[in-house]
Amino acid sequence: GRGNRGRDKGCNIHEDICCTDVLLRTPNIDRLSREGVKLTQHIAAAPLCTPSRAAFLTGRYWVGGSGGLPPNETTFAKIMQQQGYTTGLIGKWHQGVNCASRNDFCHHPLNHGFDYFYGMPFSLMNDCQNKKSSEIDKVLRKKLWFYTQTIALAVLTLAIARLTHLISVRWKIINFLPMKVKRSASLMLREAVSFIERHRHGPFLLFVSFLHVHTPLVTTEEFRGESRHGLYGDNVEEMDLMVGKVLDALDKEGLTNTTLTYFASDHGGFLEARDGNVQLGGWNGIYKGGKAMAGWEGGIRVPGIFRWPGVLPANTIIDEPTSLMDIYSTVTYLGGGTVPQDRVIDGRNMMPLLQGTVQHSEHEFMFHYCGLHLHAVRWHQKDSGALWKAHYMTPIFQPEGTGACYETGLCPCSGEGVAHHHPPLLFDLSRDPSEAKPLSHDTEPLFNTVINRIDGAVAEHRRTLTPVPQQLSAYNIMWKPWLQPCFGTFPFCWCDKENVDPRRG
């Protein structure tokens, strides 16, 4: 074959629903699973979108990098671009756009190895939709004084910007603003299929980053009420259709047998995302915790499926620990490139494991961060088959015993909202995947040995990290409207090139 490499990646669907739940219809994802290799212990490097995606793109624990996607980081897209592949990103980027000025585009996908980008540079929130209450406002209402100060600052900033024309610029790369959420799925799917059609004769890498199934679960009328799992289920089933359309495009162009297809998620379900008693953020099955909880499995264990007919075995399940960061080394190997030698690359080439030529993953230790804080570490003791996991910090659930942080909306990484454990909480995931029964000196003879071994690995790991500036300083978290896109004269930032009649120019 021509060696083409295509990729599609979904967001926030959990493996216990995908490929297993007959009440949730996902025939296209099920097809991928039947025709490929399913990873049951696929681990995200972080329990939130941006850091998880940064690690995914660079093959490195994100904690070693500064804000956005640092210009000195080398993504797998850049390596493949250098190897002659045409690279494209369709969908959600969520790695930032600008650094110091409104048009430096330092974090833009086109500056990180992608030849083509059509999608959303930021995240998907209720704030993007009309008639939806702002997610930010929900937090600010709890702090009335801070809310008032923020509004006052925003008004002053807008007034100054309007009078000085500070940000009244035209972004010719923008097709429509504000975002047309109801049309986003069809537009992005159109672009993904078009990309495959345009580049079918040459090697390409396509990263399709669906807005599904992320809250606020924007779903077309065709799929609303169709599932038996509420709006979340409707959104999953619509995403499955989109997966099918991408697979159909590969079939149509005769690329199926020469394309490596990869399906994954950037983190686990968002337990605190609710509308009254309706759960919107998904379900993590037997696994404790969820989004923003770095240590618990529910926040970091995600689906992983690889398909490459004739190269990878079909209908195969691998229980070994693997990481989203592994795609970096895997794709680089397949593209004939070389990973950077001047930095630590935490991802591993998965091809030997996927093809069955080795029985064990190369990963011995994995480190689970929440912000800058190391919450947990897993140790894959290959000789015994044990899968140890030590928790140094865990979030304090609110209300107590509920399994999530419903009172704050997201669990914090540090401060009064977390509990410190001395000695660490220890589990053997091979016997207790739900992390329900912590081990102790009395119940586990190897307790001290395991903790000492993990502590040593932590010390070694920390020696590989380079200190970076504090990303949550007062200045860094301040709203900077002058760095945001504005098509037209500020504050009238809207356009819709998608609806322009081509006959009228």
Image (cartoon, rainbow, N blue to C red):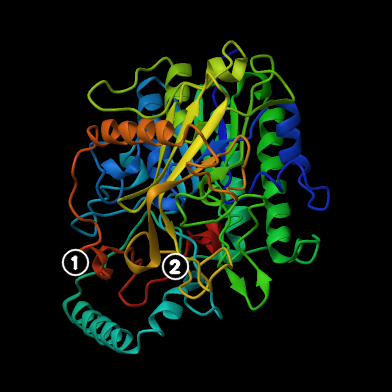
Along the viewing direction, whichever of 245 and 48 lies nearer the viewer = 48
On screen, residue 15 above or below 353: below
Residue 500 drawn at (x, y percent): 52, 62
Secondary structure beneath dot 1 equals helix
Residue 124 drawn at (x, y percent): 49, 62
Instruction: Residue 37: name its quadrant.
Output: top right
Residue at figure coordinates x 57%, y 43% from the top left: 302
Name the residue tied to disc 1. Answer: 475
Secondary structure beneath dot 2 equals strand
Residue 448 drawn at (x, y percent): 41, 35
Specify the quadrant that holds the N terminus.
top right
Name the residue tied to disc 2. Answer: 495
Residue 252 drawn at (x, y percent): 71, 30
Which is closer to the viewer, label 1 or label 2?
A: 1
| Residue 493 in view of the camera | yes
- In the rendered structure, the answer to whether residue 56 lies left or right of residue 265 reads left
Callout 2: 10 Å neighbours few (<14), some, many (20+)? some
Q: Residue furthest front?
A: 442
Q: Looking at the image, tell me whether mark 1 or mark 2 is earlier in sequence order.
A: 1
Residue at figure coordinates x 27%, y 85% from the top left: 155
Q: CA distance from mark 1 to mark 2?
A: 30 Å
Callout 1: 10 Å neighbours few (<14), some, many (20+)? few
Residue at figure coordinates x 63%, y 35% from the top left: 40
Q: Amino acid at mark 1?
A: Tyr
Q: Are marks 1 and 2 in contact (CB under 8 Å)?
A: no
Q: Amino acid at mark 2?
A: Cys
On screen, residue 8 above or below 165: above
- In the rendered structure, the answer to whether residue 250 lies left or right of residue 265 reads right
